[in-house]
Amino acid sequence: MKKNFLFLCAIFMILLAACERTPESTQTIPTDQNSPATFTLKTAPEDVSQASFGYDYVELPEGFYYKFCGNSFLDMLYFCPRGGDSFVPLCSKPNCMHADEDCNAFLGLGCIGFGYYNDALYAGVLNARFDVIKMNLDGTDHQVVATVDYDWLRDCSIECEFHHGMLFIFAHASNDLPLEERVDHLVVLNLSDYSQKEIATDYLRTASLPNALIYYKDKLYMLGTGDKTQTYENYDPYKEQLIELDASTEEARIVLPQFMNALYVTDSTLYYFEPDLTSLDYRAASLTPGFREYDVESGTVKDCGLPVADALWARYDEEYIYVLGFPKDNGEEKTLYILSRNYELLDQTELKNGLQIYAIASDRIYFFRRGANAPISCYIEKSQIGSRELTLIPIETVG
């Protein structure tokens, strides 16, 4: 990546100058290029962070990209340089209005996934077919490099995720189909040569596609019941299991036989959180909420307690555990707690007016407000954690 740094800096400085509020803007071009050159990411840019909240973004040493559907109802790519105070469309074309396919930031109406691999950005676009589009890091040179075209696509709802040099394509069969014809599919596309294969086919003959939780190396960890007769109407969270899907072996296996809503995986240990489901009006059960550690070699589980009494769910990264409390004030307010990886409370702050976490990056926690077409609107500097003075800093999405 170092070989592209000087080129990227030049492009991004031009991009920032070209994409202010109006095409005629003449912004002064920043010249400080030292910070990105020495910045170390917490997660490789081609991998989905284990702290992911399910939203599409890419973090590089030079800055942060995310996909946003604004007032034009078109998916566009936005970029903020490392340490910056605004997101701008990923387009350096003079006088571009950032409103149609002639804009370098344009992703269209059917973009359902966005990611990075080998010094390029990728998008998964679903219209009449499913196309994989590759582009340069400055948004130029959009090319369709692969098409995923299976007969069953028309009877499925499609989701996708870019991770570890692969594109995972999840195809959920329509509930309108007879049960015997209701078969889900999972396709993995290799971004190095665009080869495609279906995995976990034996498992999916009798089970519905589980819900993705986190990604680790070539593996995908998902939650499901193993029973395709389970639907949204009769779904029982107490029957959920943690299922590991391995893209290299193409197999699925049950890892742990219980529900969880947070997970962090290493080669030796699975760290996870079991929430209090009874507080969510599910069927009463004897489940004791808390943090757990599963030793892969011995198969034993360590109970690490519940340091925050109102914990609803959590996310982990290499440094911290981020815990959200139960909603208050008609769901518009909740507490964000930040724990050490030793389960000690380090800091907390109130999230009000529907504020939610968008992404946990290497240096910042980004937030947006709940609702349609809501951009990233503020952030917390992770360097503040432990100060007991966490500050939500506004950030603008321009254009």
Image (cartoon, helix red, strand yellow):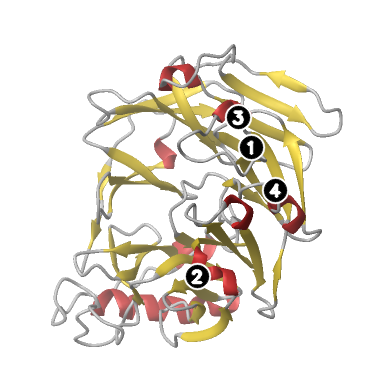
**Spatial separation of the CA atoms under disc 1 and disc 4:** 11 Å
Residue 221 versus residue 202 in the image, above or below = above
- The percent coordinates of residue 322 (x first, y second) are 48, 33
**Spatial separation of the CA atoms under disc 2 and disc 4:** 21 Å
Q: Residue furthest top?
A: 286
Mark toward the viewer: 3 or 4? 4
**Spatial separation of the CA atoms under disc 1 and disc 2:** 25 Å
Q: Are marks 2 and 4 in contact (CB under 8 Å)?
A: no
Mark toward the viewer: 1 or 2? 2
- Image side of residue 179 versus residue 55, left or right: right
What amino acid type is highlighted by mark number 3?
Answer: Phe
The residue to which callout 4 is attached is: 206
Q: Are marks 3 and 4 in contact (CB under 8 Å)?
A: no
Q: In this rendering, does residue 365 appear at all?
A: no
The residue to which callout 3 is attached is: 259
Task: Mark 1: give few (<14), some (14-19) or many (20+) Cα within 10 Å.
Answer: many
The residue to which callout 1 is attached is: 225
